[in-house]
Image: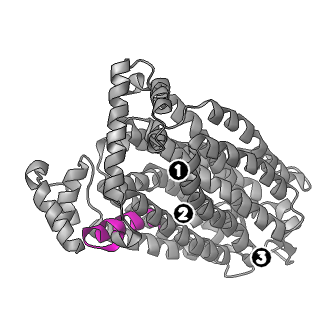
Amino acid sequence: MQALRENRRAVFWSIMISLSIIMEGYDTILIGNFFAYPEFAKKFGQDYGGTTGWQVSASWQTGLNMASTVGGIFGGLMNGYFASKFGYRWVLIVSMGFLNGFIFVVFFAPNAAALVGGQILCGLCWGVFATLSPAYASEVCPTNLRGYMTTYVNLCWAIGQLLASGVLRGCLPIVGEMAYKIPFAVQWIWPVPLMIIAYLAPESPWYLVRTDRLDEAKKSIMRLSGDKTDEQVDAQLAMMVHTTRLEAEVTKGASYLDCFRGVDRRRSEICMLAFMGQILSGSSFAYTPTYFFTTAGMETYNAFNLSLGAKGMAFLGTVCSWWLITYFGRRTIYVTGMAILTVILFIIGILDVSAGSRGLWPSGGLCVFWLFTYSLTIGPLAYSIISETSSVRLRPLSVVLARTAYQITNIVSQVLYSYMQNPTAWNFKGKSGFFWGGTAFLIFVWAYFRLPEIKGRTYEELDILFANKTPARKFAESHVDAYAQSGSAEEHTHAQEK
């Protein structure tokens, strides 16, 4: 609490900038839920007759699901370049301006092809928000608050998705195109207020130091701290300048190939697979289960009511994760969470085979419990694992690799999900639980044998443990004297890289 009081201004601006994640969370789940919307299916699908009725084809579902993901990949890459050149504030302001225009494309889309194009364009902006807000929060907040702000980013996601579920449920009775256009139009509420917030917010002092604007960096530190004396501000600025120069020297000449050499190969594996585990845990199937419910025979209103409750549980799970991360280790939470998710998915598959439509409501309850467990464990934890496991020298490259692996896995997952659930394609219904339960089980086995316990370890201690090839299950009990062993560990690391 003391750290919160002393850095209340930095926390305030981190919270304000991270509001863009609420908007992204709202936007990104609309399309997946619209597949269960009768009016959306009539506009962008076709009538297959019989009990199948109006459906968006599996191929168009794939395109619509993948569009924003593809845009998000390029948006994240663009943000990496533009944020380092122009700063966080102006990149956010310009991205919001573009998004305001791109929403017109999806709102007035006359066909599925135009909607795919609009989703790609919007995805560019969402990719910027997804990478910019956490980076801003990590730079303006002190180290002892960064973990909480990272979890707050996940909370913003949950808030946005809860709002979207409420809007979707409220618009469900509307007849005609406005049933799905109103949820699109709600997106116009966000950009202008967020542009004003970004304009008023202080720029990251780290960015200003990196661009050699030291006077502006000092003013930014004073705005973010408030109560610090001139001597304290000068000392913090000197530390930033020194750290920036050291990082420039350390990262000079670093390449993506270095992430797969020596001890960094293992660290890159952990970063990539821990992030991919969010998808392979079955999130495409169970995270937004509305379409699964309706194709399995549940009434549309009941499906959206259940989805709204599920998003409420996601919010609760994310809040509870703050307590869990404080008292339990990263490995313990990740392995236990993945084990529970695996069991839930297999039970959903068994219910579909054994009970058919009679098992639909129990399956719905299990999806709600899955979402709560995911939001409590795997969801917020992956970000901490990535930032803490990667080496200081290769951290920016490791984060990009992990994000790219996540996005590629997500694209494949979206393709499979569209065909698995669509009644005009494979029509697996709840049997998809067997497939996603299998992928979740593979990640559980990997995590049990390969994911180390990194909670409470300094970067120097982690360097030594990885250099000594300490088994993942022995990380927690291994004693490390960073001062006595740092030299030998560094020599060992360089020898392996050679």
Marker disc for residue 283: 2
Q: Residue furthest left?
A: 484
Label 1: state its secondary structure: helix
Q: Are marks 2 and 1 in contact (CB under 8 Å)?
A: no
In the depicted structure, whether residue 452 falls above or below residue 185? below
- Residue at 72% x, 72% y is 63
Nearer to the camera, 83 or 409: 83
**In the picture, residue 286 is in which quadrant?**
bottom right
Its colouring scheme is one colour
Whole-number angstrom distance, CA of label 2 to CA of label 3: 21 Å
Q: Which residues are magenta?
A: 259-280
Q: Position of residue 226 (x, y in %)?
A: 45, 20
Whole-number angstrom distance, CA of label 2 to CA of label 1: 32 Å
- Residue at 41% x, 17% y is 227
Drawn side of residue 232 relative to residue 486, left or right: right
Q: Residue furthest bottom?
A: 426
Q: Which residue is mark 1?
A: 84
Drawn side of residue 256 relative to residue 179, left or right: left
Residue type, numbered disc 1:
Ser
- Residue at 80% x, 72% y is 55
